[in-house]
Amino acid sequence: MKTIATRNLDASPQGGDKIPVGISACLLGKPVRYNGGHSQSRLCLGELSRHFDYRAFCPELEAGFGVPRPTLRLTGDPSDPRMVFSNDASKDVTDRFKTAVADKIEGLAGLDGYILMKNSPSCGLERIKVYRDNGYPHTERTQGLFTAALRQRFPDLPVEEEGRLNDARLRENFILRVFAHHHFRRVVEDAPSLGRLMGFHRDYKYILMAHNQQEYRALGRLLAQAGKEADIGTLQAAYKKRFMAALAKPATRRSHCNVLLHILGYLKRALDGATRRDIMGVIEQYRRGEVNLATPLTLISHYVRRCGSDYIQAQRYLEPYPAPLGLRNQL
Ligand code: SF4
């Protein structure tokens, strides 16, 4: 089976196109909140907006609730909550809201990520209160109704709350997943073949290893056992589901060190002993938390570019997203 060198396929948004990412409309500064205000996000409108082509969506507006409107809340069973107006719990708008979202959700196909507004009974990702009849919330929390519909329809789509993006590890992990999702769509789904899928897996080896070594091996077996007669649609869907799930947990300092040492192993014949020891010393500094991830990576990348094989140069781990985002300076 011939694998395809995915580095040669133009999947980069830097070529001109930005990556399509959905976002709660209020985060872009649109005055769609219940009181006519917004929740403009400096983070989303800053450096991220140079790489993301935002598709703003306000589900409460789409449901025709208007601006201004009374606030909404979730009530009843936390596993299947109802949506009501906070000032009049007898006005159950669940069906109206869900129907409006169902009508629009297909319009959100083709995205590579979604950034959600926190604490919203519509857009919240987690910890949303569900109220009992007595007016007190259950201890069990849930996600917003729009978010539930979005995740059900697009289970592999990277989603994150804007507030959580202030955490450097969560921010890096979300952006990594958005770029990987985009890459998968462009190089595998746009022209499905077993060769492309295997090429993708090969180029993401070290990213997968940094996140989940076991799953890296399991996905390798999944592809190796697929015969030429395998249904490529079923295979790529199964691969994508597990690949995106494996990336969802941020990589640790320890697993990054493991990957860096593996990559260094590929250079051992090209480097003299003193240079190798220098690089290992910097990896140790990173392990001890004295320098950030960008430090050993910049050093190793320098040697990979100078004397690495095509295989190691093609590893997406070396640059999974544009360097100007500066994400690895904060890890
Ligand atoms: S949180 Fe969601 S529903 Fe509420 S204003 Fe923002 S986009 Fe609209």
Image (cartoon, helix red, strand yellow):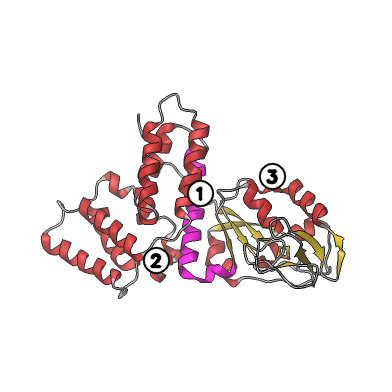
Q: CA distance from mark 1 to mark 2?
A: 19 Å
Residue 106 got which mark? 3
Mark 1: secondary structure: helix
- What segment is highlighted magenta in the picture? 162-189
Q: Residues within 10 Å of mark 3 (few under 14, many from 20)?
A: few
- The answer to whether marks 3 and 2 mark residues whose Cβ atoms lie closer than 8 Å is no
Residue farthest along the top direction in this orientation: 229
Which residue carries the number 2 mark? Answer: 328
In this rendering, would 104 be left or right of 87? left
In this rendering, would 100 be left or right of 13? right
Q: Please identify the quarter of the rendering in which residue 203 is found.
A: top left
Q: Picture coordinates of residue 283 (x, y %)?
A: 26, 66
* Amino acid, disc 2: Arg
Q: CA distance from mark 3 to mark 2?
A: 35 Å
Quadrant of ligand 1 in image: bottom right
Q: Choose the circle earlier in sequence order: 1 or 2.
A: 1
Q: CA distance from mark 1 to mark 3?
A: 18 Å
Q: Picture coordinates of residue 103 (x, y %)?
A: 76, 46
Mark 3: secondary structure: helix
Residue farthest along the bottom direction in this orientation: 290
Residue 40 in sight in this render: yes
Which residue carries the number 1 mark? Answer: 181
Residue 168 got which mark? none
Quarter occupied by the N terminus = top left
